Amino acid sequence: MFPNIQSALSPELRLVFQILTLPVSWIPKVQAPIVRFFWDFSYSWMTTVKFTLLMLPAMLFIFGLWCTMCAVYTLPFRGARGQFIIAMLTNWWDSGRAVVFFWAGIARALFLSVGWLWGLLRILAAGLYLAIFELFMLPFSLIRRATHNSLQPGLPWLAVLLTLGWCVLEAGIFSFTLAPTISEIARDLVGSASQTFLQPILFVMLFFLVTGSFACMHVMVDAIQQHNWKDIIQMVIVELFVMFFEVVFLYRELVDAITPWLAQQSGGKFQMGIAGVLFISAMAWIGVRGMTWFLFGRFGTPTLLAIISRRGGAEIPAGGRPSAEAIFGWTKEMIGHVKKEIGWFHTTGKELVEAYALPPLQVIAATINFFTVFFTGRHLFNLPLKTLHALTETVEVLKFSAAPQGHASRGADTR
């Protein structure tokens, strides 16, 4: 550019032009090989390295040269020239440190990235291990908690579940056994019977029948303990009717099923009459009902009756009530672990963003400082930048630079 302008001038003005442009005429010669170096895109990896590591320092160097050499033209007209020269030299020193911190910051960012990725893989592996371990140990944990809760004082939920389960089992067995008989009776009464609706209805009826049998036994036992003869006689009569119904319609079918086996084992000599069948059926009913009553029925039936009557169950003692920490300890531990890892990611993520943002900001801030020193004789940024919060110091610098003008104006008003 300068040779073209010089060739267009007259010989008398060329010497003047050379003297006037002497401070800046050599900059394009230095700038040209730098531009050619970055304009070479022969190798992609080399281009990436150049634009990542050298582009910003090269721009800082070129802008610094232009601002410094152009500032030479302003020296005769500046006040406090000594401070201006010191500020410009200090800016070159800060620019060199900014370039060094730029390269060191890139290395630090890469190191933090490797550590962050390693921590992420470690957390994912630990989380996967904990998930697999929890999934594998879940049945054992449930068994342990159920056992722990069942051993503590309070409502006998295990007995309630066993009582309901036994009622369902007994109703299911007898509904399957009585289905053909009830189907024949329904066919004789109405002419046809649908097995689709008959089986569920029969199951529900037998379920309430078996459950009511346990309720009658509970009332009878309470009446015996309280020596309430009226309730005793009433419950004995009701229980006899219940036993008669279940023996005739339910347990008799089971005894009839083993009668051919007894006849076969005795060579046809043993023949049970109706009395024998009813006696064995009655003994079977007493044995089954007594076994289920003393095992779990006497504990689960009162709770079921309390729920049905909405009287509520017995209050669990404070010492026997399992704490929430004991029940959900593993859940809280997992939640705490996740919260801790989220906090780690938050802190490390901020450090990682700062590590990637600070290196280029060092060079950009040094470049801006050249312009601010050229126009105002003062640095805008205090280099090197240690954190992103250091950028807020520019506000303080601007306030400080605006303060003398305010004092001057107030002084003028006073005068």
Image (cartoon, rainbow, N blue to C red):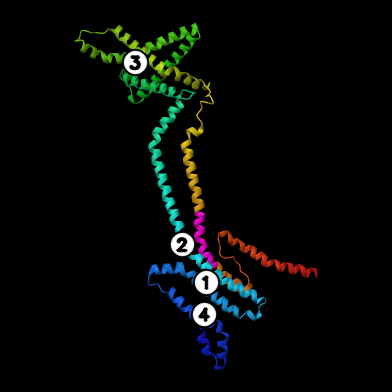
Q: Please, what is the dominant secondary structure of the magenta stretch?
A: helix
Which callout, 1 or 3, points at the residue further toward the start of the chain? 1
Residue named by callout 3: 250
Q: Which residues are magenta?
A: 349-364
User: What residue type is disc 3 on?
Assistant: Leu
Q: Which numbered mark, 3 or 4, is in the foreground of this view?
A: 4
Residue 401 position (above or below residue 337)? below
- Cα–Cα gap, marks 1 and 3: 100 Å
- Picture disc at residue 60: 1
Above or below residue 46? Residue 298 is above
Residue nearer the viewer, 198 or 175: 175
Q: Is residue 359 magenta?
A: yes
Query: What residue is disc 2 on?
Result: 107
Q: Is residue 201 above or below residue 119?
A: above
Q: What is the spatial separation of the Cα atoms under label 2 and label 3, in whole angstroms?
A: 85 Å
For label 4, the residue is 27
Q: Position of residue 284 (x, y in %)?
A: 34, 13
Q: Residues within 10 Å of mark 2 (few under 14, many from 20)?
A: some
Among all residues in the image, which is located at the extreme bottom?
11
- Comparing marks 1 and 2, which lies closer to the viewer? 2
Mark with earlier residue (2, 3): 2
| Location of residue 166 in the rendering, given as x and y in whole percent from the top left corner | 38, 21
| Disc marking residue 236 | none
Q: Label 4, secondary structure: give it.
A: helix
Q: At which x and y percent is residue 281?
A: 33, 11
Structural crowding at the residue carrying mark 4, measured as other residues with C-alpha within 10 Å and reported as few (<14), some (14–19) or many (≥20): some
| Mark 3–mark 4 distance (CA, rounded to whole Å) | 112 Å
Relative side of 42 to 265, left or right: right
Q: Secondary structure at mark 3?
A: helix
Residue 379 position, x and y percent, is 61, 69
Give the mark nearer the N terminus: 3 vs 4. Answer: 4
